[in-house]
């Protein structure tokens, strides 16, 4: 049957439109397939370039114990992280601070944002305390607001890791940023209280300090190196002048000798300097030479461990230390004449009075808490 020109034209237009639509659809499909393949290829390349690493999920201070709850695993670009951030992942991943029973030790912050260690045992949370000898324990009576001690020591499954430097949240973790908290504490270590030191304005509990003696003649000696400080809290306020530090028997006598020298020499200053990054910085080497009577006491005192006696004798009985003592400190004391004894008596009595007052305020604050 013959078709008229109008029908033929309409059919041809329809067929042309269909072909055009099919071509456009084909091009779109081809474009989408190319885009999809490009995206898949890019994702595969990113996957190859991505690695797993641990980052901090909170700010951490230098010297702070690292617990597992501080760490979060993230996928990061291999090119944007140091190589040891990926090679150390298994070491960090396998680290978990726990007691021998498998209870995780974790970090919580008090009202003043100070980090504290806690452990949950049989569903009950206990604050973890640390003794001067680095032993960890919990006290169930303190949790129950009882006044008597009931220490239960915790045996840890690994040596705690501490931060070498202060780090911000999202810092990539590597073993270079961590160190083991494995400082052995000798049996003769005692907590000592001092209230005659000139302290840094911003000194807080947990800071590490050197104690130094500066003489008016310009000599400046390191008496005690890298000691962690505790600031007594009196009536809810940190003491302005008193600190607690853990010292060995030899270090106690060493400090006593420096205090006597500082008291006898008018214008001398016994002061503390703070470490900026305690986790990374090594302890300074003490340079203060003790006097002959203190040296003899260190040799003869039966309370001093043999190791401590040998170390102290080797440090302070050499020729250089003796020359320093005779040429500078003894001469500075002698130059004060009769005034030296007066300075000693006045300042010693002032120290005793300050110590008694600080102690009374501290005990009164404890009595207020108990009441």
Image: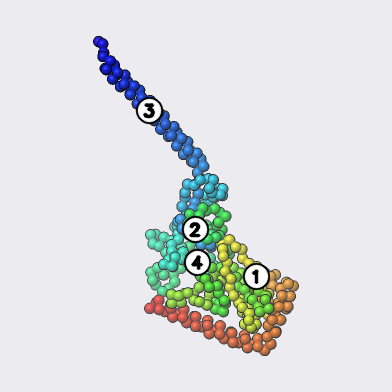
| Residue 168 badge | 2
Quick check: 332 left or right of 89?
right
Q: Closer to the observer: label 1 or label 3?
A: 3
Q: Which residue is mark 3?
A: 24
Q: Disc count in the image?
A: 4
| 135 over 258 or under it: above or below | above
Q: Secondary structure at mark 2?
A: loop
Under tag 1, what secondary structure?
loop
| Label 4 secondary element | strand
Q: CA distance from mark 1 to mark 4?
A: 27 Å
Residue 358, position as x, y percentages in the image: 49, 80
Q: CA distance from mark 4 to mark 2?
A: 25 Å
Relative to the observer, which residue lies in front, 304 or 175? 175
In 3D space, how far apart are the residues under numbered discs 4 and 3 (Cα atoms)? 75 Å
Mark with earlier residue (4, 2): 4
Q: Earlier in the sequence, mark 1 or mark 3?
A: 3
Q: Are marks 2 and 3 in contact (CB under 8 Å)?
A: no
Q: Residues within 10 Å of mark 2 (few under 14, many from 20)?
A: some
Sequence-earlier tag: 1 or 2: 2
The residue that mark 1 highlights is 286
Question: Splitting the image into 4 quarters, where does residue 16 fall?
Answer: top left
Q: CA distance from mark 2 to mark 3?
A: 54 Å
Q: Earlier in the sequence, mark 1 or mark 4?
A: 4
SS state under label 3 = helix
CA–CA distance in space, label 1 to label 3: 84 Å
Q: Which mark is residue 130?
A: 4
Q: Quadrant of the C terminus?
A: bottom left
Residue in the image at 52% along x and 82% along y? 354
In the figure, residue 298 lies in which quadrant?
bottom right
């Amino acid at each position: 049957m013959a078709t008229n020109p109008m029908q033929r034209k309409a059919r041809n237009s329809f067929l042309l439109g269909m072909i055009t639509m099919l071509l456009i659809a084909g091009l779109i499909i081809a474009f989408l397939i190319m885009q999809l393949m490009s995206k898949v290829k890019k994702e595969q390349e990113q996957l190859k370039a991505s690695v797993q690493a641990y980052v901090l999920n909170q700010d951490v201070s230098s010297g702070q114990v690292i617990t597992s709850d501080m760490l979060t695993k993230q996928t990061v670009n291999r090119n944007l992280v140091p190589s040891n951030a990926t090679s150390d992942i298994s070491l960090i991943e396998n680290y978990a601070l726990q007691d021998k029973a498998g209870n995780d030790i974790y970090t919580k912050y008090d009202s003043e944002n100070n980090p504290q260690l806690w452990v949950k045992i049989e569903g009950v949370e206990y604050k973890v305390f640390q003794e001067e000898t680095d032993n960890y324990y919990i006290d169930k009576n303190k949790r129950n607001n009882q006044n008597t001690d009931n220490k239960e020591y915790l045996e840890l499954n690994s040596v705690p890791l501490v931060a070498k430097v202060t780090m911000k949240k999202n810092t990539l973790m590597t073993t270079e940023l961590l160190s083991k908290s494995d400082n052995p504490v000798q049996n003769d270590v005692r907590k000592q209280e001092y209230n005659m030191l000139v302290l840094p304005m911003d000194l807080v509990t947990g800071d590490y300090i050197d104690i130094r003696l500066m003489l008016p003649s310009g000599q400046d000696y390191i008496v005690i190196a890298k000691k962690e400080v505790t600031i007594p809290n009196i009536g809810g306020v940190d003491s302005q002048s008193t600190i607690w530090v853990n010292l060995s028997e030899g270090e106690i006598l060493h400090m006593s000798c420096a205090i006597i020298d500082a008291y006898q020499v008018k214008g001398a200053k016994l002061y503390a300097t703070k470490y900026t990054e305690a986790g990374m910085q090594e302890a300074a080497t003490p340079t203060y030479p003790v006097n002959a009577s203190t040296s003899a006491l260190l040799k003869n005192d039966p309370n001093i461990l043999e190791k401590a006696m040998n170390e102290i004798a080797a440090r302070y009985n050499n020729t250089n230390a003796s020359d320093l003592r005779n040429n500078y400190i003894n001469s500075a004391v002698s130059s004060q004449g009769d005034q030296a004894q007066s300075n000693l008596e006045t300042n010693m009595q002032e120290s005793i009075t300050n110590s008694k007052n600080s102690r009374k305020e501290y005990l009164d604050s404890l009595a207020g808490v108990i009441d």
